[in-house]
Each structure stands twice: as structure tokens, then as C-alpha cells.
């Protein structure tokens, strides 16, 4: 019966159909719209063909779009650095035993299941001027004014802090799972040879953890490049362009200014950049995997 | 040596206590805000817990009983539940086909389904909006602003991950068991019902719960592809941002209610979360 491929294809059909309908068709559609000049609010609301490169040529010189991509990448790298270092320390600490460990671990898992939009709300309530305890606390004890509605740097770093709050637990738990699966023999022989804890960490733990680290970096970078919800809730992309990440920029161009054609070209470029980064990391992952076999 | 160990233990405990406070404090504040009147929230933040008798229930009754938020809640429940059920059934079928049959190009199909998950939703916002509102049309019926549209849409993100999660589990069930049943004259449906589903039950439960959670939490596409009739609770939450003079108490109450499934879920599948979120690449 398993040689009868017809049954196999029949079982796959609904999945493939749905993925074509809501995955592949939108992709080709956005590619198609990207070749047109199309703004339903303009004097001429119809689609006009102005050459294949029309929107893309504009896009290359669109500083706001390019800076939004740069901002997204900077954000992804900054949060990755903090989450990875903090997560690694926490994962290592969870290997030893200490009081209330499972309780602490359970609470640490909590942010993972909260919706991004709710995380945005939680932080808004906590940090907004005139309501949140954080600005009050900073003002009273340090004389520091926190008002990310006006201060661009504060807005960017507020998003970074929120992301660290939300996603460090993911890094911790993933690294912990990787650490607990490591073989014990190298550690024993290193101890017999008189290596200290720091040497063991640098020369044994890190090299053995590389595959897990790559998975974590891969998933975190992909998610950071996608970020929209939390930012939309907390700062709405402002003040100015301070927290306008690529996703938010596309939203504003498409649904506020109704630049359909131009927005499509942006979507395609955004998709392309994500895929390139994704593919680079994936090939690193695969080549690491092969060299270990 | 012993003293050093004790110091290590104490410092780890202190570190984790601080961390737990940092995690819980913003949530605690949200709960406080949801119990207070606008007047109580004015001025210096009061961090002491609210007494039960003093809870300002209007924050909850105003959106959920008098307001539109009960509809949003209902839509969210329908969309997330149907999507989880659909994804689990389809993924089970697809995974079985990929795992048992030698289909030409099955690896490419597997890889293609995965790429759907990696794509940023913001890039698909516009084409999906245009397709749903103008192109996918059956008479007067469009997919725009319908629950069916959202249920189908979330398959793009949930199916790849469900297939990935289930593949490891179904690959682990020996092929000989299926073959023995088929030799005894069982049809495919019986094989699924009597063999695959019982053996893969924990994996199926985790898959459907994680799919539910994703559909429940999704905001960006839900907000662009619905306007009145199919709005879900996350889109309702974002409506507080645009209104002038936000009613913080009500906003906190809605956020709190929308967090409930996540909390229930956390107790049920805490052990599997890592495997789920890393696509099974790292076993939790």
C-alpha cells in the first residue's frame, strides 16, 4: 500500500492547496503589484505600468525605507547580544541546584506564552508618563526623566528592554535543553587534567554548544526582523522615525498612505533581505552539521 | 570549598529572585491597574494590592458585558479553536504521507512548507488584504473580515511548524506496525484511529495547543484583514492606543482577560515549550 503514491498525494493535497492559496498566491501577487504604480487615493487610482523597475528604482533611494532596514538589523543584533549573554548565564546557573529552582524556572517561562501585543500593553502601562511606576521611580530616585514619547534614544532602548524581557526566557530554556544534553565524558577528563571552570567553559562547553547556539541565533534573528506588534502598541513607530522598523514602515506606507505599488516593492525587498539572512544562517547550520558527521 | 559552594548557592538564589521580580512586577502592575478607577490611577502610582471589596469591576463589565469585547472574545475562541483543529488534522495527514510514502520531491515539499513560516507577516499584509477583499470572491462573499479567512490564513504559519513537530514523532513509530495492520485488512482510517493517533497522542496535544496559542496571539494580520465582524481580542486591545485619553483600567482588564489561555496553556505544556518553539531542533 505504501508503494501506491496516489494515497500519499491525496493525504498531502489539502495542505498543499491551502499553502498555495494563502502562501504562494500572495507572494506572486505582491510581486506582480510591485511592477505597477498604484495608489487608490491618487488622482488616477488605477494601476499604471511604468516599467518593471519603476518602484524598485525609487526604493533604492528611499532613505526612510533603507534606514528602517538598518534599524531593524541593528535592533536584531543588539537584542541578540543581550539575550544570548544573559540567557547563557541563566542557563548555566540552572544546571546547579538551588532553593525554589523549579518555581523560578516556571515564572521565567511565563513571558514566552504572552502575546506580543499584550507584552506591548503591559509595558505601556508600566512605563507610560503619568501612569507607570517606572518613570516615577526613575524621577524620584535618580532624577532621570523617562519619556519615550519625546526622546528617540529612550524609545529605541525601551523596545530593546521589552524584547529582552520577552525573549530571554526562550534563549535560557533552549540553551538549558542543549546544555543538559551534552555528554559528560569531556568534562570528567578535563577535570582530571586540572582545568579550571573558566577553561572548561571556553574550551569544552562553548565548542560543544555551537549547534544549539546557531539554532537560537537563527530563530531570534528571524523573529527580531519581523517585530511589529509590541512596537506598534508601545510607541507606534515614533517619536519621529526612532522605532520605525521595516514592518511598521510598510504598514504606514500601505495602510495610511495607500502606496500599493510602492508598498509591494518594499514587501518584496523586505522578504528578499530576510530570506538572504535566513539562507546564510541556514547554510552555516548545514555546513556545521556536515563537518560533525 | 564548602563555604564557596554555599555562597554560590545564595548568590544564584538572589539573582533569580531579582529576575523573578523583574518578570512579575510589570504584570502585577497591570493587574493593579485593572482593578482601579481612573481617579485612583491619577498621580503617584500606588503599588499596594487592591482589596477585593474595592475592585473596580466596571473595568471588566464595561468592555465585556456592555461593550463589543465579548464579540471579539467569541471570535478569538472560534478562530483559534477551529484553526488548531484544522491544522492538527491536516498536519497529521501530511506528515503521514511524508513519513511513510516514497513521494518524488517530498523533501522539497517539506522544505517549501517550512519557508512559509520564516517569511515576515508584514510582507504579506498588503497582498493578503488585496486578495481577501477583491480577488478571492464568490458572488458577494469575500474572505475579508470573515473568521474563515483568518482560520485559513493562520494555516500558513501553523502548518509548517505542526508538520515539523509531528514528523519526528511519526517517524518514530515503526513502519512495520502499520504494515501489519494493513496486511490484516485494515484501511488507512483504521490505521490512523487505532495506531497513529493513540501512539502520537502527546505530540498531537502539544501541536494543537501551540497552534491554538499562536492563532490566539496573532495580531498584525488579524488587524489588517478584519474590520467589524471578525475582529479578535488582540486587535481589540490595539484599539485602545488610538483613542484619545486612553482608559487604562479597561485596557489592563482586556489585556488580562486575553492572557488567560496563555496561563492555562503554560501549566499544561511547560515541558514541551522549548521543543515547540525551536521547531524541535532542540529537544526541551
Image (cartoon, rainbow, N blue to C red):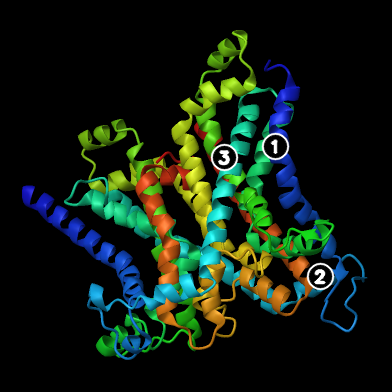
Tell me residue A69's x, y (percent): 63, 69
Tell me the element at label 1.
helix
Tell me residue A91's x, y (percent): 32, 50
User: Mark 3 against mark 2, which lies toward the viewer?
Assistant: 3
**Residue A90 appears in which quarter of the rendering?**
bottom left
**Residue B27 appears in which quarter of the rendering?**
bottom left
* Local crowd size for mark 2, using a 10 Å CA cut-off: few (<14), some (14–19), many (≥20): many
Q: Does B157 sit left or right of A293 as displayed?
A: right
Quarter placement of the N terminus of chain A: top right
B98 versus A28 height, above or below: above
Tell me residue A284's x, y (percent): 57, 45
Which residue is tagged 3? B88
Which residue is tagged 2? A261
Tell me residue A289's x, y (percent): 53, 36
Which residue is tagged 1? B109
- Between marks 3 and 1, how big is the CA–CA gap? 18 Å
The answer to whether residue B281 is visible is no
A78 versus B4 height, above or below: below
Quick check: marks 3 and 2 in contact, CB under 8 Å?
A: no
The answer to whether residue A43 is visible is yes
- Residue drawn at the location 70% of the way across and 26% of the way down: A8
Quick check: marks 3 and 1 in contact, CB under 8 Å?
A: no
Residue B178 is labelled as none
Name the foreground residue: A126 vs B268.
Answer: B268
The answer for which chain carries disc 3 is: B
A132 versus A102 height, above or below: below
Amino acid at each position: 500500500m505504501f508503494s501506491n503514491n496516489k494515497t500519499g498525494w491525496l493525504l498531502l493535497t489539502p495542505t498543499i492547496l491551502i499553502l498555495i492559496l494563502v502562501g504562494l498566491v500572495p507572494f506572486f501577487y505582491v510581486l506582480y503589484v510591485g511592477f505597477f504604480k498604484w495608489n487608490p487615493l491618487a488622482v488616477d487610482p488605477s494601476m499604471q505600468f511604468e516599467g518593471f523597475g519603476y518602484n524598485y528604482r525609487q526604493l533604492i533611494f528611499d532613505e526612510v525605507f533603507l534606514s528602517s532596514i538598518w534599524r531593524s538589523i541593528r535592533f536584531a543584533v543588539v537584542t541578540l547580544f543581550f539575550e544570548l549573554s544573559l540567557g547563557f548565564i541563566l542557563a548555566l546557573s540552572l544546571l546547579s541546584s538551588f532553593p525554589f529552582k523549579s518555581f523560578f524556572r516556571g515564572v521565567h517561562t511565563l513571558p514566552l506564552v504572552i502575546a506580543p501585543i499584550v507584552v506591548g500593553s503591559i509595558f505601556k502601562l508600566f512605563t507610560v508618563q503619568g501612569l507607570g511606576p517606572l518613570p516615577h521611580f526613575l524621577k524620584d530616585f535618580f532624577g532621570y526623566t523617562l519619556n519615550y514619547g519625546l526622546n528617540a534614544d529612550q524609545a529605541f532602548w525601551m523596545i530593546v528592554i521589552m524584547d529582552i524581557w520577552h525573549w530571554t526566557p526562550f534563549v535560557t530554556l533552549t540553551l538549558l535543553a542543549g546544555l543538559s544534553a551534552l555528554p559528560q565524558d569531556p568534562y570528567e577528563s578535563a577535570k582530571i587534567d586540572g582545568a579550571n571552570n573558566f577553561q572548561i567553559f571556553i574550551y569544552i562547553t562553548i565548542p560543544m554548544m555551537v549547534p544549539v547556539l546557531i539554532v537560537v541565533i537563527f530563530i531570534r534573528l528571524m523573529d527580531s526582523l519581523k517585530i511589529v506588534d509590541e512596537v506598534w502598541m508601545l510607541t507606534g513607530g515614533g517619536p519621529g522615525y526612532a522605532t520605525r522598523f521595516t514592518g511598521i514602515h510598510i504598514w504606514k506606507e500601505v495602510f495610511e498612505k495607500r502606496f500599493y505599488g510602492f508598498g509591494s516593492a518594499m514587501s518584496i525587498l523586505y522578504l528578499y533581505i530576510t530570506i538572504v539572512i535566513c539562507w546564510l544562517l541556514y547554510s552555516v547550520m548545514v555546513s556545521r552539521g556536515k563537518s560533525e558527521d | 570549598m564548602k563555604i564557596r559552594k554555599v555562597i554560590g548557592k545564595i548568590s544564584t538564589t538572589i539573582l533569580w529572585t531579582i529576575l523573578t521580580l523583574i518578570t512579575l512586577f510589570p504584570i502585577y502592575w497591570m493587574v493593579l491597574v485593572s482593578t482601579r478607577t481612573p481617579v485612583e490611577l491619577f498621580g503617584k502610582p500606588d503599588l499596594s494590592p487592591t482589596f477585593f471589596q474595592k475592585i473596580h469591576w466596571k473595568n471588566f463589565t464595561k468592555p465585556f458585558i456592555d461593550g463589543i469585547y465579548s464579540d471579539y472574545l467569541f471570535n478569538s475562541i472560534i478562530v483559534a479553536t477551529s484553526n488548531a483543529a484544522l491544522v492538527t488534522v491536516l498536519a497529521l495527514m501530511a506528515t503521514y504521507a511524508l513519513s511513510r510514502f516514497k513521494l518524488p520531491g517530498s523533501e522539497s515539499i517539506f522544505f517549501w512548507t517550512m519557508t512559509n513560516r520564516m517569511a515576515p507577516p508584514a510582507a504579506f499584509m498588503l497582498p493578503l488584504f488585496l486578495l481577501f477583499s477583491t480577488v478571492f470572491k464568490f458572488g458577494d462573499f469575500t474572505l475579508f473580515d470573515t473568521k474563515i479567512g483568518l482560520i485559513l490564513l493562520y494555516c500558513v504559519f501553523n502548518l509548517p511548524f505542526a508538520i515539523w513537530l509531528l514528523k519526528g514523532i511519526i517517524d518514530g513509530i515503526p513502519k512495520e506496525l502499520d504494515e501489519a495492520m494493513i496486511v490484516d485488512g485494515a484501511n488507512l482510517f483504521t490505521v490512523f484511529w487505532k495506531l497513529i493517533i493513540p501512539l502520537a497522542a502527546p505530540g498531537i496535544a502539544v501541536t494543537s495547543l501551540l497552534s491554538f496559542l499562536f492563532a490566539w496571539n496573532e495580531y498584525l494580520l488579524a488587524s489588517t484583514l478584519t474590520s467589524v465582524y471578525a475582529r479578535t481580542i488582540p486587535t481589540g486591545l490595539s484599539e485602545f492606543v488610538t483613542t484619545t485619553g486612553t482608559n487604562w483600567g479597561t485596557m489592563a482588564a482586556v489585556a488580562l482577560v486575553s492572557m488567560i489561555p496563555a496561563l492555562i496553556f503554560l501549566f499544561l505544556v511547560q515541558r514541551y515549550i522549548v521543543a515547540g518553539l525551536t521547531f524541535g531542533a532542540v529537544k526541551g
